Amino acid sequence: MKRLHLTLPLALAALLVWLFLTAGLGSLSGGAPSLAASVAGGVGIGWALAALFALLLVLISERRADAGLGAPRPWRIFLLALPPLLYALLMLLVAWAGGWPPANVLLIVACNTALVAVSEELMFRALLLRSLLERHALWPAVLMSSALFGVAHAVNGLASGDLGGASWQALAAFLQGVGYAAIRLRTRSVWPMALVHGVWDFALVTSLLTTAGTGEGSVLPFAALLAVLPLCLYGVYLLRASQRAAFQSPN
């Protein structure tokens, strides 16, 4: 069976389809009044379809071995994801400082944030980053994939009706994208960052839900830009020139 060569134009076209699945389906069905309400309102069919779509593209691509579906290589390099994972867990403790939503809501949020994390890591760090690296040097590819990650979050914010949150979501996602791309390249796997990404989103959404019930403002959304700066700087550190020999082949 001949496999698909996922060129950059094809990857960008796939991104448009992926955006429709993640944001467009919710808009056509009426959507929810906010991002938090969307994530907590039930398992999102659009997010599930987007994750399946991205996974299918990776599986049929001609260079799927380069997409990062395998485990980190070598295994001990997973430790590079430990600092951001601990940081995401700290954000979760901050989010739950004032209490937490009911258990059934937490379960729905956990399912949706896991779907979103896997879907976004496959789309942006497995497919788009790989395609960009075929045409561009390391840093331009990382920055462009991170910028597209930011644009996607702005679209999600606008689709859910959260106009005020769209801009900070976009900038925060761009900064996160640098750190996510760095760990994906250094570990040669999307799964370490899918784990970190899922915990981070889970912390953010549960924070929004908790404060929505009390009528107070959430700490995490307003501090998001400052909160993601350490992750961005960590990514810059991982991609420093002295370490690039470790991932010259970004598979």
Image (cartoon, helix red, strand yellow):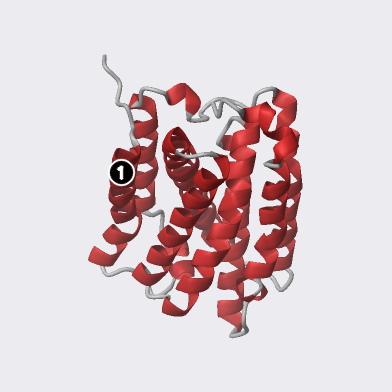
Task: Name which quarter of the figure residue 57 lies in.
Answer: top left
8 or 57: nearer the eye? Answer: 8
Tell me the residue at 34%/68% (across/down). 159
Amino acid type at image mark 1? Ala
Task: Name which quarter of the figure residue 32 lies in.
Answer: bottom left
Residue 237 position, x and y percent, is: 73, 46
Tell me the residue at 48%/30% (across/down). 67
Q: Is residue 246 above or below residue 8?
A: above
- Image position of 40 (left or right of 25): right
Q: Is residue 233 above or below residue 1?
A: below
Identify residue for label 1: 14
Residue 40 position, x and y percent, is: 47, 63
Residue 192 position, x and y percent, is: 63, 38
Q: How many marks?
A: 1
Say few, some or many: other residues with alpha carbon within 10 Å of mark 1 (under 14 / 14 to 19 / 20 or more): some
Specify whether residue 150 is in view: yes
- Image position of 74 (left or right of 175): right
- Image position of 14 (left or right of 103): left
